[in-house]
Image (cartoon, rainbow, N blue to C red):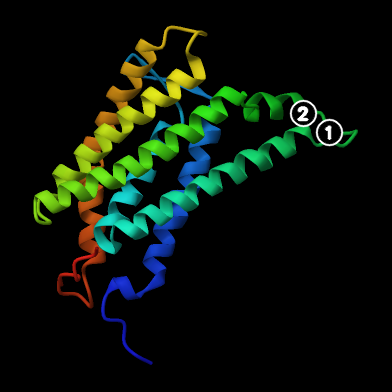
Amino acid sequence: MHPIKSVQDSPMALAILVSLFSGSLVLAAILATKIITVAGLTVPAGVLAYALTFICTDVIGEVWGKQRAREVVGAGFLTLIAAFGLIQLALHWPPAGFWEGQKAFAAILSTTPRIILGSLTAYLVSQFTDVWIFHACRRITAGRHLWLRNNLSTALSQLIDTLIFISIAFLGLMPILPLIVGQWIIKLGIAALDTGVVYLLVWGLKVKDGPRTRLSEPA
């Protein structure tokens, strides 16, 4: 057997991040049915789970490169479609005669077509934008200032995500400006807090057998 030369040669770390990405993505869609208040701002309960997806793509892009990050985003889109499809199937499947939880089940998992369309569109545009901005900043700074590309890419892509989702899902139903502003402020706060997590994960993935080593620059 040939020894593993770097974490890029091992599928385990990448598999864990991809699993965390996909799981957080699906959980965010489900948890979004509950609306919470944070510091006086109204946001879906899935906002934290969704923020984890940007941490995952930033770490994957930093360690494994832009192309791998784009592949993960594409796979996540298919995962989200499958999740929505399976949820709709479960909702419309006739319940057992003795089961009395159908109304509660539907109240939690029912999603309007506008919300599904908004979620899918916002996800696809914002996640690919995040990957593009992250790697554009990486080129401009010659691989330095991870904190800058992490925060800038997440802040701008989350703004795009919020604008698209809120506009498609709620335009004409309620005032959307307070929703957009509130969600983006919360997402900016999460982005600032997750910088340390991104640094820790990237540093940990670039450590081999104890001493710190530098991975070959991903494309």
For the C terminus, the image quarter is bottom left
- Residue in the picture at 54% in, 48% down: 78
Other-residue count near label 2 (Cα within 10 Å), few / some / many at <14 / 14–19 / ≥20: some
77 versus 178 height, above or below: below
Closer to the camera in the image, 50 or 113 = 113
70 versus 25 height, above or below: below
- Asked whether, in this view, residue 200 is left or right of residue 82, the answer is left
- Residue in the picture at 35% in, 22% down: 183
Instruction: Identify the amino acid type marked 2.
Output: Gln
Q: Can you give x and y, in whole percent of width and height, for residue 198 in the image?
A: 24, 50
- Residue in the picture at 19% in, 47% down: 136
Other-residue count near label 1 (Cα within 10 Å), few / some / many at <14 / 14–19 / ≥20: few
158 versus 41 height, above or below: below
Q: Can you give x and y, in whole percent of width and height, for residue 186 in the image?
A: 31, 26
- Asked whether, in this view, residue 128 is left or right of residue 136, the answer is right
> Can residue 82 be seen from the camera position used here?
yes
For the N terminus, the image quarter is bottom left
Closer to the camera in the image, 75 or 183 = 75
Dot in front, 1 or 2 = 2
Residue 188, quarter of picture? top left
Residue 124, quarter of picture? top left
- Asked whether, in this view, residue 89 is left or right of residue 169, the answer is right
In the rendered structure, find residue 99 and report the number of the disc placed on it: 1
Label 1, label 2: how many angstroms apart (C-alpha)?
7 Å
> Can residue 49 be seen from the camera position used here?
no
Residue denoted by label 2: 102
- Residue in the picture at 46% in, 44% down: 24
Q: Can you give x and y, in whole percent of width and height, for residue 71 in the image?
A: 41, 56
CB-based contact (under 8 Å), mark 1 and mark 2? yes
